[in-house]
Image (cartoon, rainbow, N blue to C red):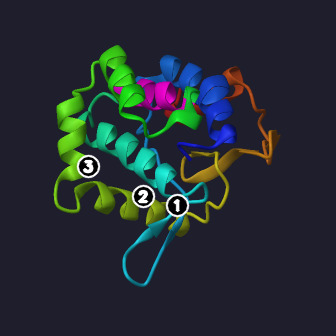
């Protein structure tokens, strides 16, 4: 997803602006699509560099579990320049911009299996939820809207920020 143009649109046009309004009401989890091989390797749609980018984003979430605004802002920054992922310069720049420790990110990715374990768990979580498209927005464990092929699909309640915010608030009881 980190190198996916649909994910870029989804994050910038829907998820990030909505999260700014409902972050205190949401248990936000970033999950990626891919496949796990028999040898426990992970394959991503856009190749090994996307897998590395996905691991970087998951490590940011793991480092800042109580503050999804930090990790989501960082992920959005990376995805804004997705063609450059996983360049060190881009990761360092986004880390600096969003208050993410580059050294801690690097340790997470380099640590024996940590980044790969996070990616494997993420891919398995997406598979268990039946998610096959990037970007699939899920609310209350159900698909709410999908961005695929440059178009919004399966968006019964709308595909804009206000509709997502209203859905979250409805479920939250406001």
Task: State the extent of the magenta-drawn residues as a range.
Answer: 70-79
- Residue 32 picture location, percent across and down: 51, 53
Query: Is residue 6 magenta-colored?
Result: no
Mark 1: give few (<14), some (14-19) or many (20+) Cα within 10 Å. Answer: some
Give the alpha-carbon distance from disc 2 to disc 3, as whole Å: 15 Å
Q: N-terminal of the two: label 3 or label 1?
A: 3
The residue carrying mark 1 is 126
**Which disc number belongs to residue 109?**
3
* Vertical arrangement, residue 14 with respect to residue 34, above or below: above
Q: Is residue 149 visible?
A: yes
**The C terminus sits in image quarter:** top right
**Which disc number belongs to residue 122?**
2
Q: N-terminal of the two: label 2 or label 3?
A: 3
Total labels drawn: 3
- Residue 134 picture location, percent across and down: 64, 49
Mark 2 and mark 3 residues within 8 Å of each other at the beta carbon: no
Q: Nearer the viewer, mark 2 or mark 3?
A: 3
Give the alpha-carbon distance from disc 2 to disc 1, as whole Å: 6 Å
**Predominant secondary structure, magenta span:** helix
* Vertical arrangement, residue 2 with respect to residue 80, above or below: below
Task: Identify which residue is drawn at 34% across, 18% down.
Answer: 98
- Image check: 68 left or right of 130? left
Mark 2 and mark 1 residues within 8 Å of each other at the beta carbon: yes
Front-lying residue, 91 or 87: 87
Q: Describe the element under mark 2 as helix, strand or loop.
A: helix
């Amino acid at each position: 997803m980190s190198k996916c143009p649909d994910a870029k649109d989804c994050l910038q046009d829907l998820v990030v602006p909505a999260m700014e309004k409902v972050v205190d009401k949401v248990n936000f989890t970033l999950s990626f699509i891919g496949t796990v091989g028999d040898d426990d390797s992970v394959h991503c749609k856009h190749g090994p560099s996307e897998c590395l980018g996905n691991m970087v984003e998951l490590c940011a979430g793991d480092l800042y579990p109580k503050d999804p605004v930090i990790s989501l802002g960082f992920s959005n920054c990376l995805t804004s320049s997705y063609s450059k992922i996983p360049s060190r310069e881009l990761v360092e720049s986004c880390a600096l911009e969003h208050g993410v420790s580059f050294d801690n990110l690097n340790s997470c990715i380099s640590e024996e299996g940590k980044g790969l374990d996070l990616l494997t768990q993420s891919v398995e979580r997406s598979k268990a939820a039946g998610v096959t498209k990037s970007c699939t927005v899920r609310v209350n464990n159900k698909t709410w809207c999908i961005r695929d092929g440059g178009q919004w699909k399966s968006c019964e309640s709308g595909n804009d920020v206000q509709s997502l915010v209203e859905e979250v608030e409805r479920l939250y009881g406001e």
